[in-house]
Image: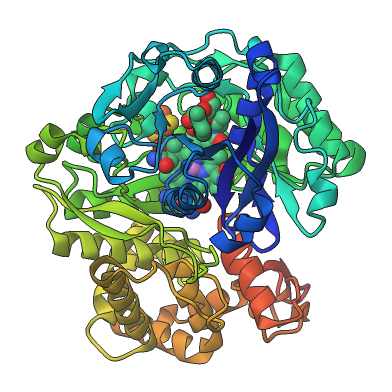
Amino acid sequence: MKLYFFQCQESYGNSIYLPYSSGILWTYARQFDAIKNNYILGDIFFEKLPVKDYESRVVDPDILLFSNYGWNTTYHLGVAKRFKELYPNTIVVIGGPNAQQQESYLREHHYIDYSVWGEGEQSLVELLTALANKSDMKDVPGIAYIDNDQYIKTTTRIRKTDLKEIPSPYLEGVFDDYFTRYPSYNFMPVWETHRGCPYHCTFCDLGADYYNKVYMFETDRLLSEIDWFSERKIEYVEVADANFGIFPRDLDLVKYIKQKHTENGFPEKINATWAKNSPERLFEMSKILDSMNRGGVTLALQSQNKTALTNIKRINIANDKLEDIAQKYIDLGIPTYHDFILGLPGETLDSWIEGISYVIDINPEGWIFGHPLEAYENTEFSDPNYINRHDIKFAFTPQVSFFAHRNKELPLEIGKYVISHNTMSYDDYIEGFLFKYFMITMHSLGWANIVAENLSRDLNIGRSQIYKKLYDYIKLSDNIINTEYQITKKSLMNAIQTGDFWGRQIFGSNDFYWEYESASAIIFENNRTEYFNTLKQFIIDIYGSEYIKYIELNDHNLICHGRQYPYTTEEFTVNGPMFNSFQDFSKAIYHRGRRTKQWKTKLTATQNGAH
Ligand code: B12
Ligand code: SF4
């Protein structure tokens, strides 16, 4: 029997992830005689192509297997449905974090034969074996299906404790021919060093008790995988772990990554979700990785509101400890970032504003993420009791995926977003989103950063207070910052109310959807003089004209596309990179480089200016 796997996604330019989950499932399954003797692999697909394109690539399929994540489920269901029409005897199996098992779901999507929940390796082998032997599916744990109009859900699959039994798809050659079959792609591997997460966040798939124990893959295998990445000149590796850095051996892993990078330049970058409570080790790891660490180190928060943290079962490190850690990273110039989630029950507009303001004041160098809270089916946010207790209201919108190209020909992936609850109204939610948009644009993307830094020192007030004053100020008159604020508000509300994509296209209809703060930064860059005039007027009106000198300083510090670098003023030489086009500039500074402050030029004092 012939199997085809689908783990499809949109590309990021010509970069695309290798379909690791499907790959590991097949690598594991094919070890067993029952699979080897009965099944052959047709292909493992990873691109979101028009379904028609797959009709010629999928030949006489017996089993179609879909790896469902929030970003591909609608697409996969469309593919499954079409193939079921073409080949009614084909068996459709879904798995992955977004595979649902409720009776209503399986009845609605009647072309799904089996839905697998939880870890997939053993379930897949047992399911395929049972299909080959025509034996009773009820004995296969972890699956749900409709049989003779009867809904059946089997017992929960027990997780594998010994990951040694699961071979690596990279080392077993599953993807080897991808590099010749798809020469135009820049493949990004997903790298799994452990499985599970010790925490219980209610909004997260991995917060379930099921995933609470953490099991490790063997170190030797991981080192060999690093060799594989390096030999194949992989630029970018995405670490799949929930807490990379949680184990002491993770330090050795990054040492080896760095060693390989030093030998031949690859991998170039890695991105990880970092461990929450091993600050010393993380510090060491990030020192070793240095600029290889694409996005900086997580100083996770989600919220600074204690009730919200209790409601999502999250414990953060104490503020004084956080302040010390942040300072250590600042001293060494290692980028950090804080994740916030907008929409957590218990959060209020005030506590949201205070949380963001707090991190700006204690870690002015850190990047801020303010994610809209998406409610996943396999979490407490789909539990009617939890929803009722917090009076949670949702909006169904296209899934948030900033900086992604959206192909309007393909089916939309819809996400379910929390837009209000009993301590945050819908209006507060919109205002909370806009506040974080404003703070990130002004502070993290540099548009008022240097002004706030200097004023805060001179006046001995927190930087966040200055931004808040500016926020109130710009709303009172007609100015470019207010115009951008209004456009962002409209675009956000359109996404929530009318199902538009989140984000804004700036460079025409083939452009990707920029995150709102980056979009406004590009507009300000295009209207730089007007922008700085507005900022100047604010300084004069609120703080006095003696401080307008900081406008000029901000301007020199903030990279400008139209300027030739280096240039010299009376006081300093200003250096910065040059770009061929405005689009290249925008991508380098406000997309790829936004978290590591690529907006910042380098100022060195000239001799006559030195003092
Ligand atoms: C790598 C990763 C990414 C990569 C994407 C890589 C890619 N395209 O493949 C990046 C960084 C781009 C990413 C982005 C996002 N991600 Co992400 N990501 C992950 C991460 C860290 C690892 C996933 C992974 O590959 N794990 C390794 C595989 C082997 O494990 P697994 O996925 O659990 O698969 C097992 C089972 O599910 C099952 N299984 C899987 N497929 C199948 C298929 C069959 C047929 C069977 C039988 C079984 C089966 O077997 C597998 C092995 O046991 C997970 C968190 C985590 N640690 O799991 C989040 C996770 C998948 N991401 C998530 C989310 C929400 C996002 C974002 C929407 C976040 C955001 N707001 O921007 C974006 C969306 C991106 C987009 N639009 O494309 C959620 C998904 C929730 C859901 N219900 O879908 C997760 C689970 C994290 C979470 N908080 O809950 N992500
Ligand atoms: S959000 Fe992170 S820490 Fe919390 S359960 Fe999910 S993976 Fe674990």
Which of 18 and 199 lies nearest the eye of the viewer?
18
452 left or right of 169 in image: left
- Point out the image quarter for the C terminus: bottom right
Q: Position of residue 89 (x, y in %)?
A: 49, 39
Residue 213 locus on image (x, y percent): 44, 13
Quadrant for residue 419, please give it. Answer: bottom left
Quarter assignment of residue 383: top left
Vertical position of residue 52 compared to residue 30: above or below: below
Q: Quadrant of ligand 2?
A: top left
Does residue 449 lie above or below 487 as drawn?
above
Quarter of the N terminus within the rendering: top right
In this rendering, does residue 583 appear at all? yes
**Residue at 57%, 67% in the rendered image:** 590
Q: Is residue 544 above or below residue 317?
A: below
The image shows residue 182 at horizontal and vertical percentages of 78, 54
Residue sitting farthest toward the right: 263
Q: Residue 204 versus residue 526: which sits nearer the camera? A: 204
Q: How is the image coloured?
A: rainbow
Which residue is depicted at the point 29% across and 91% down? 478
Residue 412: image quadrant is bottom left
Rendering coords of residue 67 (x, y %): 51, 39
Q: Residue at 36% x, 68% y: name it.
A: 438
Q: Nearer the viewer, residue 201 or 73?
A: 73
What residue sits 56% from the left and 19% below the top? 132
**Foreground: 314 or 164?**
164
Position of residue 437 in the picture relative to residue 79 (left or right)? left
Q: From this viewpoint, which residue is outermost toward the top? A: 162
State left or right for residue 39 relative to residue 532: right
